[in-house]
Image (spheres, rainbow, N blue to C red):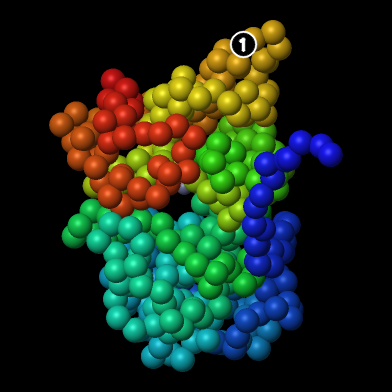
Amino acid sequence: MGATVDLNFNYYMPTRILFGCGKLQELGTTPFLPGKKALIVIGASGAMRKHGYLDKVIGYLKDNGAEAAVYDRIQPNPLVEHVEEAAQVAKKNRCDFVLGLGGGSTIDSAKSIAVMAVNPGKYWDYINGGSGGGQTPANGALPIVAIPTTAGTGTEADPWTVITKTDTNEKIGWGNAFTFPKLSIVDPELMVSVPPDQTAYTGMDAFFHSVESYLATCHQPTSDHLALEAVSLITKYLPIAVQDGGNLEARTWLAWANTEAGICESLSCCISHHSMEHAVSACFPTVPHGAGLTMLSVAYFSYLAERNPARFPDLARAMGERTEGLSEKEQALAFLTGLKKLIRNAGLERHTLSDFGIQRTDLRRLAENAFHTMGKLFALTPVKLTPDDATAIYERAYA
Ligand SMILES: [Zn+2]
């Protein structure tokens, strides 16, 4: 008899994904459209109209026998009030599915709107964490279709939706089996219009989803494979896409890396790096999520690598760093070398927390917010962190 193997996991990934350049067209013919009347959810910036994506989506839906209403008020850090308002629009128009078109904020909103279109009460009644009511939505959600136009959150391949409640400074991720999209169309051609800064922020977000899913104590074989591949692809192609947004090869590999990272978030999970960033952008909403993660990352991951270097050497090698002949600790630190290079190559070295108005005296409050709202992710982090540790990490990142 051989030794027992510690291999024990669940696998559930129910989203149908259509991937590739030009795939948006298939919205017009796919037999998997989950309804006849869509609520299309887009951001308030006007980009989806300006680039002609909204008209295309409405046209393809029509070809496929579906009508559409449009809700266009979603903000970059999406808000509870817009989720609840859009759910009323969905009800009034008798929509039978919700289609998110745009970046992570609009697709996350589409998921939350799909829940509130069929369930009573307030959105926050259902949130687990912070001041949320922790109720289970009895009626599930309307079916969700996701069409991402950025390579960032991976939300097209996971059940998570992150919404902010401004009066209490809470930004909490939440989801369930009903908030997986039924259908996601990932068309890299829609991503060539993303400006360099946003390409960098969203690409780094996908990078950290992969890294964190690899380190999380709930990691499993499929998430491990996908996470390491996504880390390699983002290291190689993100700097190219930031330099040359029209490079379809780079956009395509980044789109896939982002979807892989989303699958990792479904099969494994993010860790407390995300809790700590959510606290930052909940209290300082002008901080883009990917920028917040990047500003915290060197301090956060070096704190972890110093205390538990296991699994960091694989990440270093995935980034193309040399590890032969090095001790485990040195190999772990090679990941930090790779991370700093990537941040520089993505053009994000210049940002600091104080640029966004954050004071040193805010740091303790941010640590407490991270534990209060997203404390669950600390339990999946491979090093036990207390609010004192989190404060120390913010201090290092601030220095
Ligand atoms: Zn994220």
50 w.r.t. 341: above or below: below
Q: Seen in the image, is 49 located left or right of residue 281? A: right
**Horizontal and vertical percent for residue 5?**
72, 40
**Horizontal and vertical percent for residue 29?**
74, 78
Q: Is residue 257 visible?
A: no
Q: Which residue is mark 1?
A: 327
Q: Residue furthest front?
A: 1
**Horizontal and vertical percent for residue 131?**
25, 61
Residue drawn at (31%, 44%) of the image:
370
Instruction: Please rate how many residues cluster around mark 1, counting C-alpha atoms within 10 Å: few if below 14, some from 14 to 19, many from 20.
Output: few
Q: Of residues 133 and 251, which is closer to you in this image?
A: 133
Q: Of residues 219 and 281, which is closer to you in this image?
A: 219
Q: Residue furthest left?
A: 361
Q: Quadrant of residue 318?
A: top right
Q: Is residue 321 visible?
A: yes
Q: Of residues 4 and 172, which is closer to you in this image?
A: 4
**Horizontal and vertical percent for residue 135?**
36, 73
30 w.r.t. 260: above or below: below
